Structures are given as C-alpha cells and as structure tokens.
Amino acid sequence: MNEASSYERMLRGEKVFSPDWDLIGMQMAAQAKLAEFNALPTDRVEERMALLKQMLGKVGEGCMVLGSMSFEYGSHIELGTGVLLNFECMFLDGAKVIIGDFTLVAPRVQFLTATHPTLASERFAFDEATGIPTGGYTINKTITVGSWSWIGAGAILMPGVTVGDHTVIGAGSVVTKDIPSHVVAAGNPCRVIRPNA
Amino acid sequence: MTDKTAYLQMRAGEFYKGPDLYLMELQMAAKARLDALNAIPSFDVAQRMPMLEQMLGSIGESFVVSPVMWEYGTHIHLGDGVLINFDCIFLDGADVRIGDGTLVAPRVQFLTAGHPVDAMERLTYDVATGKPNGGVTLNRPITIGKNCWIGAGAIIMGGVTIGDGTTIGAGSVVTRDIPTGVVAAGNPCRVLRKASRRDEAANAA
C-alpha cells in the first residue's frame, strides 16, 4: 500500500478520520511519558529537562516548564531558547506548535491546532448500513508564536494562527486570526489594541 | 547568606529579577507541601485544615477543594466561609485577600504577577555577552470583598479590587476594579447591572 499514513496526512494538514489506532497508540505512548514528567517535583530540574528533551520536538537552551503541562504528541512542539511555560499549559499538537526565543507563556494557555468541520454531517462519519456515527474528522493547522512575545494567562490560540515577535496577548484572549509583531492585542476575538514599541 | 533582595522587592510591589534562587526555594517548598495537600481528599478536613493553616497566610473556617495551585501560599488570606472550588491558580507574589462568604468557582485564576510589555524591558541581559539571562516581574495585590461569587474560569489580574456582594461572570477577564453589589462579566470585565433582588425582578419583568 502506497497510501499515506494517517500520521503523514495529519502533519500535512489534511482531514484525518478518528478514532485512528496508530495515532491513538502514539498519543498513549506520549501520555505515559507526560505522566512521568508531571509527577516529578519541580526541584528535580535535571530529570525534568532530560524528559522534556525526549518528549518535545525541540527544547532550546534555558527553557523552563513550571508545574505540569499537557499535550497529545509532544513531538510537534518546538521551543526556542529561554522559553518559559507557566502552570498547566495545554497543546493539541496534531500540527506543529512553534514558539520563538525568550517568549513567555503564562498559566493555562491553550495551543489548539485541531479543528473540525462545523457541519455535523461532515464532522462525523456514518456507518453506511445503519446510519449510526462511527467516528469523526479532524484537521490540524500549525500555530507559530514569534520571539520576545508574552502570551497572557488563559489565552486560547486557535488552529493556524501566527503571533509575531515582541507582541503581547492579553489574558483570556481567544486568538482566531494572525496577530502581527510589535503590538499589544487582547479580547475575544483577540484584536490589536495598540503598538508595543 | 541567602539574598532576599528580590523577595523584598516583590513584596514591596517593585520590579525584581528572575530566576531568583531564594524565590525558587520558597516556591519549591510550597510545591512539595501542595503535592501533599492535593493528594489528600478534599473532604478530609481534619487532616487538611492544619496543613492549610500552615501553608496559607491566614484562613478562617473556609473550604479549599483540590487540586489547587499557588506559588507561595503564604500571601493568600481567606476569611470565614470562603469556598475555593477545584483547579484554582494563585500567582501570589503579592497578597490575594478573599473576604468572608465568598464563593470561588472552578478554574479561577488570581494573577498578581505582571511584566513590562516591551521585551527589551521584560528581559534581563548578561552585561558581557548581551544574552538574555532572565526577566523582570512586578506583583500587585488582589482584594476580593465579602459575599462575592467569582464565576468559573474567571481571570483576576494584579492590582484588582472587587467590592462586597459582587458577582463576576464565568470566563471574565477582570482587568480593572469592580464596585460593590454588581454583576459584571466579559473580557474585559464590565459592570452589567446591580446585584440586588429588586433589580433582578425588574429586569425579568
């Protein structure tokens, strides 16, 4: 079979059917390591860093993760130099989540690369014989955050968004569209409030 | 000798540099105690209350549901009859004071910590190499009055005071002071109406 695997299609941003047992297998393996990481006390710095480097796609020098975090795969998360992730950040990382150098991520920020068709008839797959739903479809889009930025607590970054360099996203913002460099932006939906210079 | 400069600056509401060894020491000690607290079922008050009394700045006859997360604990002051529902977060470099009879719904965040929005000011640099070696933080106290209700997932920013008897809607981002006796909601959180029963009835009519 030359057909692309569901994993390859997911990374290309194509529609993927779930449940997919290959993807679930990868997620379960990632969850096992993540549980180990989250159970390690904050002061076991070296062990935590070693695990983090095993789990994530990239961990720059001087990165810090405070408390616990959660993700689906981990391997698609790329942290630049000196990135700080505060308590309980969440990554649905079916696509890449790339965070630039010296960017500060406050508690409970969510990076959600996963999205679905809004029409239930397209979101679900149905058994042809019975008409009963058998699963659903997901598309993942890369999220990119620049360098020297600060993402406020509880902000939610939606699939495909790019946040520029030197930009501040207010707490609780829902970032549905790209936000340029050198601005302060906030709100739901997140809008540019003023330049940050 | 332990250098407590950053701690004193933090408590005075001034900018301080991180990472700071003494602050990390305090946070790690607090985290170890938190892990122990969070491992005990929330309803085991007999076991948890003495722990909470040790960990928090002060606590009356109040109830804290686990899991709960804070940086220091010692700067949190809860009155009598306060309920902290599960999964709340306190960045408590400055004081967080919650008055008697106030109800805090799940996943509320009290964030006293702030930073400069300009990255050049937010980060600190090694003088010799010019490389960033940390950042600066400033903490401002949060004060919640008596008989308030803070809705689930609300985020309360540093420096905010919320008056007695006020209700904050779920998911609100409270960036400025909210007066006494109102219902306020949204991002940013704004006053919607007065909280009295009489007004409620008038609105419903």
Image (tube, rainbow, N blue to C red):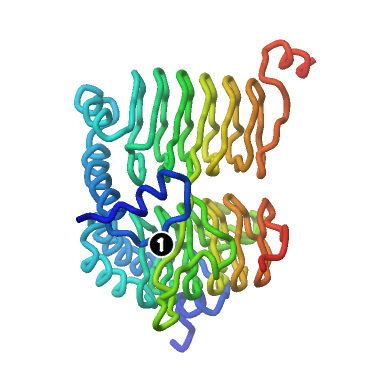
Which corner quadrant holds the N terminus of chain B? bottom left
Outermost right residue = B205
Subunit of mark 1?
A
Task: Provide the residue designation for mark 1.
Answer: A71
Residue type pointed to by label 1: Phe
Which residue is drawn at the image coordinates 33% and 36% (left, top)?
B66
Q: Residue A53, relative to residue B169: is it above or below?
A: below
Q: Position of residue A138 (x, y in %)?
A: 55, 65
Q: Position of residue B136 (x, y in %)?
A: 46, 60
Q: Secondary structure at mark 1?
A: strand
Outermost top residue = B198
Which residue is drawn at the image coordinates 53% and 61% (left, top)?
A112
Q: Who is closer to the viewer here, A197 or A61? A: A197
Q: Who is closer to the viewer here, A76 or B177? A: B177
Judged left or right of residue B72, residue B48 is left
Q: Position of residue A54 (x, y in %)?
A: 29, 74
Outermost bottom residue = A2
Q: Quadrant of residue A22?
A: bottom left
Judged left or right of residue B91, residue A135 is right
Q: Who is closer to the viewer here, A157 or B114? A: B114
Residue A172 seen in the figure: yes
Q: Residue B112, relative to residue A159: is it above or below?
A: above
Q: Who is closer to the viewer here, A124 or B63? A: B63
Which residue is drawn at the image coordinates 39% and 26% (left, top)?
B78
Q: Quadrant of residue A155?
A: bottom right
Which residue is drawn at the image coordinates 39% and 18% (left, top)?
B80
Q: Quadrant of residue B163?
A: top right
Q: Position of residue B205 (x, y in %)?
A: 80, 15
Residue B155 seen in the figure: no
Tell me the crowding category of disc 1: few under 14, some 14 to 19, or many 20 or more residues within 10 angstroms, Cα based. many
Q: Report the label total.
A: 1
Q: Residue B60, relative to residue A53: is it above or below?
A: above
